[in-house]
Amino acid sequence: MEIREAVFDDWEKLLEWVNSPESLSNKKLTVQTILESDHKRWLESVLGTDNIHLFMILDQDQPVGQMRFQEQGQQSASFVIDIYIEQVFRGRDLAFKALTAGMQRLRKLHAPSALIFVAVVKTTNTASLSLFRKLDFILDKEDADFSTLKTYG
Ligand SMILES: CC(C)(COP(=O)(O)OP(=O)(O)OC[C@H]1O[C@@H](n2cnc3c(N)ncnc32)[C@H](O)[C@@H]1OP(=O)(O)O)[C@@H](O)C(=O)NCCC(=O)NCCS
């Protein structure tokens, strides 16, 4: 498993993943299919900003997923995480390894600031909830539909 920063040429894979039905059904904000033109505009803006870090997750040099760390407006050094692994590559520890590597990369980039990582997960998304618990995230808030988990430092 390796991670690398996303580039514009990754747009097609990223669009395919974000528009997968389960990906949309697990999201809090984006619930409708994203158009290619909107997606390209979004990707351009993401790649041009410092407060979003978008990585491709590779297995034997092939892209198998993505993860995004997005700095939260109000609280500096607090990053919300989004991750997606293609279905056939799941259950092989790739998300765990990718997030471990990604959080380490961000800590280095932002040293010496202590970072907070946040995951907003649908309460029915047991795979994701277990993944973040295994990464030592702790439950911060919970409502009927979503749990917010955090890890510090
Ligand atoms: C959540 C997701 C990223 C996990 O990816 P993955 O590569 O399969 O996860 P890993 O193999 O690294 O598993 C790590 C841990 O997550 C948990 N986990 C993963 N898949 C699971 C499943 N189907 N059921 C229960 N727990 C699961 C386990 O605790 C696992 O550790 P273990 O194998 O030692 O028990 C993947 O299922 C996915 O892309 N889902 C759709 C998108 C999504 O929901 N993203 C999260 C929104 S933030």
Image (spheres, grey):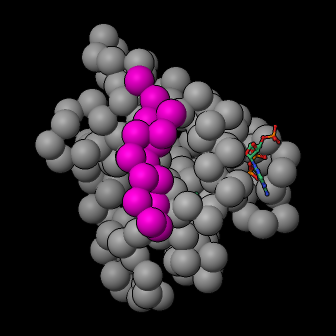
- Magenta highlight: main SS: strand
Which residues make up the magenta segment? Answer: 138-152
Image coords of residue 65 (percent x, y) = 65, 57
Image coords of residue 66 (percent x, y) = 58, 55
| Residue 122 appears in the picture as rendered | yes
- Give the residue furthest to the top: 112
Residue 19 vertical position relative to residue 50 in the rendered view, above or below: below
Image coords of residue 72 (percent x, y) = 25, 45
Please identify the quadrant where the C terminus is shown.
Answer: top left
Q: Nearer the viewer, residue 149 or 106?
A: 149
Q: Nearer the viewer, residue 74 or 45?
A: 74
Residue 127 vertical position relative to residue 133 in the rendered view, above or below: below
Image coords of residue 108 (percent x, y) = 42, 19
> Does the stretch in magenta take in 74?
no
Q: Does 61 sit left or right of 131 as displayed?
A: right
Q: Residue at x 29, y 43 (%)?
A: 71
Give the total of numbered labels. 0
Q: Nearer the viewer, residue 78 or 18?
A: 78
Please identify the quadrant where the N terminus is shown.
Answer: top right
Q: Residue at x 84, y 51 (%)?
A: 91
- Give the residue furthest to the front: 144
| Residue 81 appears in the picture as rendered | no
